[in-house]
Amino acid sequence: MALRVLSVTQNMRTFTRGVNLIKRYKSALTVKKTLLNIPATQVTKLDNGLRVASEDSGASTATVGLWIDAGSRSENENNNGVAHFLEHMAFKGTAKRSQTDLELEVENLGAHLNAYTSREQTVFYAKCLSKDVPKAVEILADIIQNSKLGESEIARERSVILREMQEVESNLQEVVFDHLHATAYQGTPLGQTILGPTKNIQSIGKSDLTDYIQTHYKASRIVLAGAGGVKHDELVKLADQTLGRLEASVLPAEVTPCRFTGSEVRVRDDSLPLAHVAIAVEGCGWTDQDNIPLMVANTLVGAWDRSQGGGANNASNLARASAEDNLCHSFQSFNTCYKDTGLWGIYFVCDPLQCEDMLFNVQTEWMRLCTMVTEAEVERAKNLLKTNMLLQLDGTTPICEDIGRQILCYNRRIPLHELEQRIDAVSVQNVRDVGMKYVYDRCPAVAAVGPVENLPDYNRIRSSMYWLRV
């Protein structure tokens, strides 16, 4: 009787295991079907080289925007800050709309008009009702082609930008990352800040803004992206009508090589309560085949904040150590990509006396990632990366941003099911290989602000970038 019960129990276990496998298989199929059924991104190139890309989800709202392949990296020491200055000036009126007319028109549509500048891109976008897409595109086209750039508006905007610089200086994370770029890419355009130095802001005039537009706002360097309730054919017609006269660039956009330098910058200020530290090695560019494995490695290190619960039970080794030993207040790993280079590292905030211990744990985790990361950890990181990837595309605006950025970076939008397959293809050995290639025994860039006396000397930091093993 006992044998029969045991046999039945074993059969039930086998059956249950089989049911669970079937459920997981069906779940995986459902995810794949969902990814495959996402509307395709359609891309059309106009005669002047401008690209139009859109994803029509049939929503009642839409986001349309112009992604321009020019940012602070396209500047030099003398005009650093002009791209960001131009972003501000775009909303100060055009040849056919005063600033008041522009603001009233956008308000009456119930739309949102915004812009931002990064190191490699400048973006102008509008979120509106689907029926108002033609008007939104016409407004966007008007502000990048016909801005008045009046002297009085320029003078007024100087004080606004200088005030913005003061606000940025109070955000220590922004300050640390500016210092990190300045030391990692010293003497190159990527080392410059996006806002520019104060002396440049005080001297930039209409001729500087006009020269920048004429040099960089070429049709072949612009993408009109749309997401939500947008019809691609209609968007192409709108682009042809409003942006078809934009001058095509005769020469391809040149990318000034930006060399990485292992180095450090420390701004010691004992009046601050906490130390803010970033350490990074040189990563890879957007199109490099190592980008996906580096993203998985970045996810493995993870992020943590003291306000979160469950730190001691976190799957991330560094998060567990931070919670149990009170090493820091927060940390976040990052993988910042540019066209031909990148920064792969971690930023953390800690008490002054914990700088050394926190950095020791960070570098120990990096070395472990390079040499002995496990298959279970990599699988978890891959699942988390895919989840984050999908969560970030919630809404028409992030989808539109994704389209514009990818068309500029890859000249196509990578379908989600392809991206999922590329993440799934990453193995433990791939993660170890990129760790050995980019992290192990490499000279890091370090930026630290605050009471950082307890942060180890750079030579000690450098010597911890490898393990001596027999």
Image (spheres, rainbow, N blue to C red):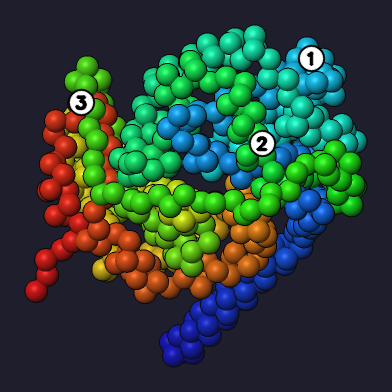
The residue sitting at 75% across, 15% down in the picture is: 99
- Of residues 48 and 406, the one nearer the viewer is 48
Mark 2 or 1: in front is 2
Q: Amino acid at mark 1?
A: Ser
Determine which quarter of the picture holds residue 89.
top right
Residue type pointed to by label 2? Gln
Give the labeled residue for mark 1. 98
Q: Which residue is mark 3?
A: 268
Q: State yes or no: discs 3 and 1 in contact (Cβ < 8 Å).
A: no
Residue 50 visible in this rendered orientation of the protein = yes
Between the residue at mark 2 and the residue at mark 1, the CA separation in whole angstroms equals 22 Å
Q: Are marks 3 and 2 in contact (CB under 8 Å)?
A: no
Q: Quick check: can you spot residue 275? A: no
Mark 3 Cα-neighbour bin, 10 Å: few <14, some 14–19, many ≥20: some
Residue at 46 percent across and 36 percent down: it is 76
Q: Nearer the viewer, mark 3 or mark 1?
A: 1
Q: Identify the mark at residue 115; answer none if there is no mark.
A: none
Q: Is residue 127 above or below residue 336?
A: above
Image side of residue 233 versus residue 28, left or right: right
